Image (spheres, rainbow, N blue to C red):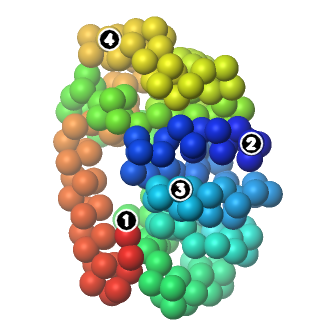
Amino acid sequence: MSFKLFKKVVDQCVGNVDMISLHFMGESLMHKDVNKCIDYVKDVGIKAVLSTNATFLKNLKTTPSLTIINYFKKNPLVKEFAKKADKENALYVLQEVGKTRGVHQWGEGGEVFDETHCFDLWSKMAITWDGKVVPCCFFWDAQQVVGDVNKQSIMEAWNSREMQDFRKKHQKGLVKICKYCNKSANWRTALASEWNKEVSFYKNRGGQF
């Protein structure tokens, strides 16, 4: 995404959202303007969240509000980042790939608790690199587009006929992909509990969030 389009999106979010995640099924630290984007989000008063696999961690020159790192063992960049973040009282979560909390299972097995009441469809917006708005992060290849921030405002995309229709189909259980999503109501409750524990832990260490 160009910084011009990114700035346009962020400007419309001011006063409407608390947090922007600068990742969507890709490695954001490969983007030439990633540090500029992070700083801009923070400058307008919104929390900037970044998730990375740490391969290009050396490209991170600024400090997000929260950094989630899924890393492979013995990556020296992670240790260096942690030291820097500690000095700046920055909030971060380290998850080693292969450990219980370091691997996310997408759509594989597991009990489906409730596939008709997804929290994300009424609380988050997913935007691809070229400005297309999709129902959620599971539509990473934009096979279902509900808006386009190149042509629409954030609110127009959020309330578009396509998005409204998708929400209705979801509530009726007609969206197949929702049946295999691990973001069920019960899964979200558990995740929220873990999230609160993480935030409390790092705040107690002096981290700011």
* Residue 168: assigned label: 4
Gap between marks 3 and 2 measured at Cα: 15 Å
Gap between marks 1 and 2 measured at Cα: 39 Å
Task: Give the crowd class for mark 2: few <14, some 14-19, many >=20 residues within 10 Å.
Answer: few
Task: Give the crowd class for mark 3: few <14, some 14-19, many >=20 residues within 10 Å.
Answer: few
* Residue 4: assigned label: 2
Q: Give the mark, 1 or 2, whose residue is nearer the N terminus.
A: 2
Q: Give the mark, 2 or 4, whose residue is nearer the N terminus.
A: 2
- Outermost residue, right direction? 32
From the viewer's perspective, tell me whether residue 51 is left or right of residue 177: right
Gap between marks 2 and 4 measured at Cα: 33 Å
Which marked residue is nearer to the observer: mark 1 or mark 2? Answer: 2
Three-letter residue code for mark 1: Thr
**SS category of the residue bearing label 3:** loop
Quarter of the image that includes the N terminus:
top right
The number of discs equals 4
